[in-house]
Image (spheres, rainbow, N blue to C red):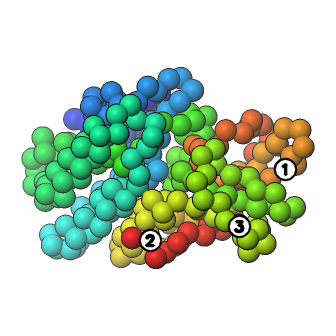
Amino acid sequence: MNDNTISIAEKIYFDDDGQLVITEGRPNFTSAVKDLFDNSVSMHICHSISWQTMDDIVGGIVKASYDASKKKELIGIFLKALYAGEVSSTVKNIRTAITLSDEYNTWCQRNIESLWSQNNGLVQTFYQKMFSQVHNLRLNSGLWNIRIQGNFDPRHWVHYNDAGIADMSDDNPNPPSVLGAYQGTFLLTSDSDARQLNWLAAVTSAIGFGYPDFVQNKLGVSFSFPAVYTWQPVLYSSSNSFLINWDQKAYLNEYIEWDRSKF
């Protein structure tokens, strides 16, 4: 699953001039988090908010010209975005997962200043706990996970096509009842997805990444459905289980709706 991962010590460290260095690749999950999931060749531990986004936002804030109190505030907001997800039913032990998630969040919130302390051990621990935040993870399709890259990966969504037929994620708890209102739109139907996107939008807006464009880039892919389906746009999400013809893919600029009141 993680052929391109390298050790956290190789990935993130302070150089001789005291500057934070974040190299290519991504850290490994903590061993405790790996033990929570039975991942296989076809199933991956998937992030809702990606490593690329963590790298871009936290690394960008640390290296920016903000004072320390502003950096601490902004990174604290981003940690809330990671923590706003749900603990997935795909973990082996919900209670252990909740405990780990709470532990990692508390540690990171208390140790934000380690990101500019020039202490390699602390900064590496911070990044690995942030990367392994359980609220931001679940086990799902590896085929989709490797293609999502830096896009937000929602858990529960529905899309009504032009014929009013609903295409939705595998485990969709809350599809809307009014078809016409959302025709042609991807609608996120999970409170946790909405909370994560709201916190993510809050921090990206504050640091000038562009609200809400940062969380709406490359959101869809076209592919051929089997049998009765025709060509349809489908949200990039590891919760997809459709048979995908990768030779006939095209990126779209679909619009996502989510409940901005959910924090």
Residue at coordinates 56% horizontally, 33% vertically from top-left? 142
Q: Amino acid at mark 3?
A: Ser
Q: How many marks?
A: 3
Closer to the eye: label 3 or 2? 3
Q: Nearer the viewer, mark 1 or mark 2?
A: 2
Q: CA distance from mark 1 to mark 2?
A: 33 Å
Indicate the secondary structure of the residue bearing disc 3: loop
Rounded to the nearest angstrom, the CA distance separating label 3 from label 2 is 20 Å
Query: Residue 207 versus residue 242: which sits nearer the camera?
Result: 242
N-terminal-most mark, 1 or 3: 3
| Rendered-image quadrant of the C terminus | bottom left
Q: Residue at x 82, y 43 (%)?
A: 224
- From the image, tell me which residue sits under label 3: 177
Q: Amino acid at mark 1?
A: Trp
Do tag 1 and tag 2 residues touch (Cβ < 8 Å)? no
177 left or right of 207 in image: right
Secondary structure of residue under mark 2: loop
Q: Which residue lies under the disc numbered 1?
A: 231
In three-dimensional space, the C-alpha distance between marks 1 and 3, rounded to whole angstroms, equals 24 Å
Q: Does label 1 or label 2 sit earlier along the sequence?
A: 1
Q: Quadrant of residue 134?
A: top left
Could you say which is closer to the camera, residue 99 or residue 255? Answer: 99
Q: Is residue 196 visible?
A: yes
Tell me which numbered mark, 3 or 2, is placed earlier along the sequence.
Answer: 3
Query: In the rendered structure, are the residues bearing label 3 and label 2 in contact, judged by CB atoms less than 8 Å apart?
Result: no
Residue 262: numbered disc: 2
